[in-house]
């Protein structure tokens, strides 16, 4: 498995793990309060820690691969995955703003934008893995 | 994803050039072993520059490494 596919798996798992932690608090988001913002910050911090530790382990285990710059195929995979994710993020953000017309508060819209970002990131790293496995 | 209609003889050329490994060839042309494997299997069409570099390593013209099969056949 290529080093960058391993990295994509690490990030994808970290995002899913942290998202699951956050979703455990989702019922409260119908009436968001200051505590939810702190939960969001804690989840972001947890993501940074999980990803940082996992990448450190990967770099120590595969130092040669970690130093090698991305080649043309890997760059193409990144570009295609990012294109998919950016489209998803734009649509998600637009839909989030539309919820304003259904009585959503500014805080709720903020959470919807974060949700769109998380889905876009999941799509990006998922697409990378698919492109690495199926070809690009 | 469908395989490309560009076939290649890289595996055979590696064999004919002292059983060169994918890792060795990849290092010489600046791609990873996994990318070279994808090229050999037809899962990825390399850039023109990478294709010329591969041909240069084996000391053969480009068309001896890569062959293009037109879907419509020769006119």
Image (cartoon, helix red, strand yellow):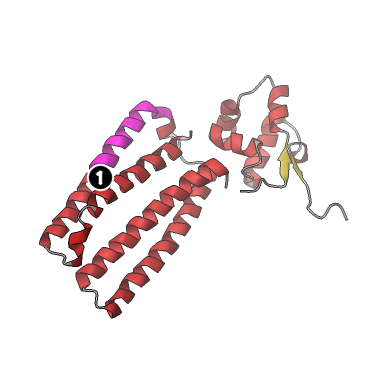
A10 vs A38, left or right, is right
Q: Position of residue A115 (x, y in %)?
A: 31, 60
Query: Residue drawn 26% across and 40% down?
Result: A50
B4 vs A105, left or right, is right
**Residue denoted by label 1:** A48
Query: Residue drawn 36% across and 57% down?
Result: A119
Q: Residue furthest right?
A: B75
Q: Position of residue A45 (x, y in %)?
A: 20, 47
Would residue A113 be seen by someone viewing this image from the given angle?
Answer: yes
Q: Nearer the viewer, residue A25 or A114?
A: A25
Query: Residue drawn 21% across and 73% down?
Result: A105
Identify the element where label 1 is drawn: helix
Q: Answer few, some or many: residues within 10 Å of disc 1's Cα (few below 14, many 20 plus, some between 14 and 19).
A: some
Would residue B31 be seen by someone viewing this image from the given angle?
Answer: no
In this rendering, is residue A51 above or below A103? above
Magenta span has A119?
Answer: no
Q: Nearer the viewer, residue A39 or A83?
A: A39
Specify the segment rendered in magenta.
A47-64
Q: Nearer the viewer, residue A21 or A2?
A: A21
Tell me the chain of label 1: A
Main secondary structure of the magenta stretch: helix
B73 vs B6, left or right, is right
């Amino acid at each position: 498995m290529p080093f960058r596919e391993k990295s994509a798996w690490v990030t994808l798992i970290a995002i899913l793990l942290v998202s699951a932690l956050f979703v455990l608090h989702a019922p409260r988001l119908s009436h968001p309060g200051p505590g939810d913002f702190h939960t969001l910050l804690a989840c972001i911090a947890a993501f940074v820690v999980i990803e940082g530790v996992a990448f450190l382990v990967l770099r120590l285990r595969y130092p040669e691969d970690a130093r090698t710059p991305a080649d043309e195929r890997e760059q193409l995979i990144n570009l295609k995955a990012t294109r998919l994710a950016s489209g998803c993020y734009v649509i998600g953000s637009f839909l989030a703003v539309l919820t304003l017309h259904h009585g959503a508060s500014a805080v709720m819209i903020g959470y919807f934008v974060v949700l769109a970002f998380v889905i876009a990131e999941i799509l990006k790293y998922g697409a990378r893995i698919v492109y690495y496995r199926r070809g690009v | 994803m469908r395989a490309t209609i560009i076939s290649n003889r890289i595996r055979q050329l590696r064999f004919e050039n002292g059983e060169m490994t994918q890792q060795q060839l990849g290092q010489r042309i600046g791609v990873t072993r996994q990318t070279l494997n994808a090229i050999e299997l037809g899962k990825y069409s390399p850039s023109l520059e990478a294709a010329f570099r591969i041909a240069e390593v084996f000391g053969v013209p480009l068309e001896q490494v890569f062959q293009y099969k037109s879907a419509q056949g020769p006119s």
